[in-house]
Image (spheres, rainbow, N blue to C red):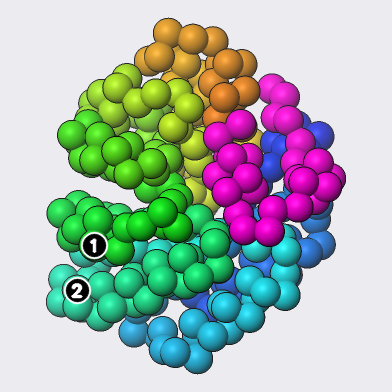
Amino acid sequence: SALPEQGIGLLMNPGCSLTSSRAASALASRYDYIYAAVGSHPDAADEVNDVTLEEYRTLCKLNPKIKAIGEIGLDYYWDKENHELQKKWFRAQMELAKETGLPMIVHSREGAADTLEEIQKAQDERLRGVIHCFSYSPEMAEEYLKMGYYIGVGGVVTFKNAKKLKEVVKMLPLDRILLETDCPYLAPEPNRGKRNSSLNLPYVAAAIGELKGVDADEVVRVTNQNAKKMYFEGRRNFDRNEFRKYVFIIKL
């Protein structure tokens, strides 16, 4: 595959529905460097039921390459009315994350206060993860840092008008940032508007480095460590031989 040959050593492919979660699980089984998350995105809230959750639970037990529950959360951008249903299944999938010992990948769009409130209500020592494609204020980021979450930063950080995210990145400790793609969306400059891929991550690392006053190689080194810590070291029944076998250092 082109990704490992071009420096992308670890790829997390999250599901957004039952169908895409099955596909993510199957893809992870085929390629050593790809891992999967299973879960239902808030846009798919009306498709979720207890049978869906039971299949996610089964997939987590059967496939050791599944390392997270996600992409889950709240999205009020498209769906102006279905908020309570979104919250119901967000809560249920947070409980699944606790039960499996896996971190969660949290999607939150135009639902800042509700997302924070739901996570705070559910929070205990078992709940951890990343706030994916973070788009809120430095103050909101601080609330997540207090609870031990990572902050996901992708191509938006390269946009000239992304003043808020740039301020967030400046205040974040480097050891709490995860690099993200959000393929096929949010390609960084100079490829903005094109189909995104993980091959664009060097642009994201360079932009973060510029904001943090470190070189891109240091951003890559630390965020790579962060990803390993979140997806591997915190998991129950962590198998260090599996960790050594599958995780590769990103080289740009």
Task: Say whether residue 69 is magenta.
Answer: no
Task: Looking at the image, tell me whether mark 1 or mark 2 is earlier in sequence order.
Answer: 2
Magenta residues, as a range?
A: 225-252
Between residue 9 and residue 116, name the one nearer to us: 116
Q: Residue visible at 49% across and 82% down?
A: 53
Location of residue 14 by image quarter: bottom right
Q: Decide: is 23 above or below 134.
A: below
Residue denoted by label 2: 83
CA gap between label 1 and label 2 equals 17 Å
Quadrant in the picture for the C terminus: top right
Residue denoted by label 1: 121
> Callout 1, which amino acid?
Lys
Callout 1 crowding tier (Cα within 10 Å): few <14, some 14–19, many ≥20: few
Task: Say whether residue 240 is magenta.
Answer: yes
Describe the element under mark 2 as helix, strand or loop. helix
Residue 231 % position (x, y): 59, 49
Q: Is residue 161 visible?
A: no
> Callout 2, which amino acid?
His
Describe the element under mark 1 as helix, strand or loop. helix
Q: Residue visible at 26% across and 73% down?
A: 87
Q: Is residue 219 visible?
A: yes
